[in-house]
Amino acid sequence: MTVNHASVLTKEYFISYLTLIMTSREYTLAQAKSFALDFFFKGDIERYGSSTWSQFEKAIKEIENE
């Protein structure tokens, strides 16, 4: 997925992204979160700014509550 560094990625974006990872790789949410942190964020939660990280965390909470 191409990411524009100038915009904040949404919770919905991350729900789709994490769901895709869990489905395609047969990962749990914890495994998908770890994968995203390493692969997407390159180990830097500030890589796309604090607002994008906040949306990522909201997506995780929403998936957990489903």
Image (tube, rainbow, N blue to C red):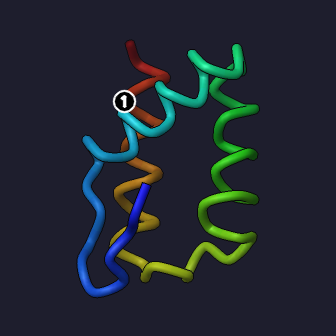
The quadrant in which residue 29 appears is top right
Residue at screen point 36% across, 30% down: 62
Which quarter of the figure has residue 37? bottom right
From the viewer's perspective, tell me whether residue 8 is left or right of residue 45: left
Q: Is residue 37 above or below residue 12?
A: below
Q: Quadrant of the N terminus?
A: bottom left
Q: Amino acid at mark 1?
A: Glu
Report the residue marked by disc 1: 62
Residue farthest to the bottom?
Answer: 6
Q: Secondary structure at mark 1?
A: helix
Q: Position of residue 60 (x, y in %)?
A: 48, 38
| Res 48 quadrant in image | bottom left
Q: Is 19 placed left or right of 12 in the picture?
A: right
Q: Residues within 10 Å of mark 1 (few under 14, many from 20)?
A: few
Left or right of residue 13: residue 30: right
Residue at left offset 65%, top offset 42% = 33
Residue at 73% in and 45% down: 35
Tell me residue 7's x, y (percent). 24, 78
Query: In the image, residue 66 lies at what x, y percent?
Result: 38, 12
User: Of residues 25 and 36, which is closer to you in this image?
Assistant: 25
Question: Residue at point 25% right, 55% down?
Answer: 10
